[in-house]
Amino acid sequence: MNKIVFSLLLLIGTATFAQPKQYTTANAHSHNDYEQPVPLHTAYSEMFGSVEADVFWHNGQLLVAHKAEELRPGRTLEEMYLKPLARLVKKNKGHIYADTSRRLQLMIDLKTNGDTTLRTLVELLQKYPVLTGCSSLQIAISGNRPDVSAFTSYPAYIGFDGELEKEYPAEALSRIVMMSADLKKYTSWSGNGIIPASQWDSLQRAVNHAHALRKPVRFWASPDFTNAWYQLIKLEVDYINTDSIRALAGFLRKLPASSFKNETGYKTYQMEPGWSSFTPGIPPIKAH
């Protein structure tokens, strides 16, 4: 009986979370954004929904790089992301984008000890109430996250990137703002042609699981070209991972609403009073 009830709840959760929508750059994630010729601003100019920065703790500073040997003194999280974002929020009178319907997620991938690095980040963010108080900016922690039992000990403006294959207690799950996984764990597909049926089913179950938990989903290490983007959209993946900002933005702008049809009969999610949505495909956030 309990299994039947859980299955029904899973179906209801998926149905209410997933909804017919036209994909836009709000569904785009700038992977390793700091490696772009113009970090942050290129993705921002295309109104991306998410940007990613890898961060190392080094001598009390948070430096941005992919590998430790690539660390450079001037490439700090503060200079590359926090200060520019603060200027943008001030310019837009408390919003991250001039279009107040749009949102941005700053994913910070911790490459060094999670507790030390995150504690330093929280201390740094105390200087930026304009960011921590911005309802259209979400800070999401990935990489070397602290133990899940500590998630709720961090300020409310800190969210966490969950691991799709992992089970979380309810308290920790309440602080998870998205789910991510390595696409290669589910498929050997190269991005060309269609995904083999059995692998498609495995991917669809993973996406449905995240949606049943009312969390958006992203796959890293995904092929990064037109056919692959189409397939990810068909799977209803909420964030399309890319290193090709301009190409994906152009693709999404040209993507007609009619090219993506949800044929599963999902009902459009109706937000409860007191809740506000974050980005398309992202679960609502309780207003305080």
Image (cartoon, rainbow, N blue to C red):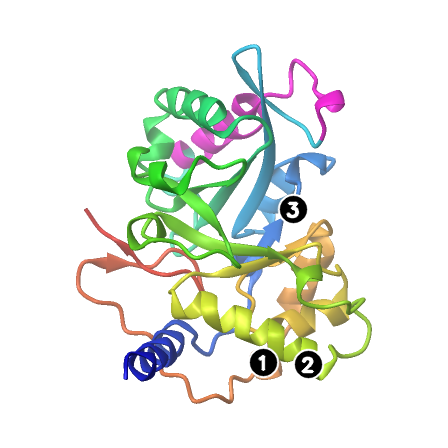
**Above or below — where is 24 with respect to 15?**
above
Q: Which residue is under mark 2?
A: 198
The kind of secondary structure the magenta stretch mainly shows is helix
Please name the amino acid that badge 2 sits on: Ser
The residue shown at (53%, 26%) is 113
**Residue with the most extreme top position:** 59
Q: Which residue is under mark 3?
A: 31
Numbered circle sitting on residue 212: none
Percent of width and height locating residue 133: 30, 36
- CA–CA distance in space, label 3 to label 2: 28 Å
- Name the element at disc 1: loop
Asked if the residues shown at circle 2 and circle 1 are in contact, with their CB atoms under 8 angstroms apart, the answer is no
| Apparent side of residue 175 relative to residue 145 in the rendered image (left or right) | left
- Name the element at disc 2: helix
- Is residue 68 located in the magenta-colored stretch of the structure? yes
Percent of width and height locating residue 111: 60, 31
Q: Quadrant of residue 6?
A: bottom left
Sequence-first tag of 3 and 2 = 3
- CA–CA distance in space, label 1 to label 3: 24 Å
Q: Which residue is under mark 1?
A: 260
- Classify the position of the N terminus by image quarter: bottom left
Please name the amino acid that badge 3 sits on: His
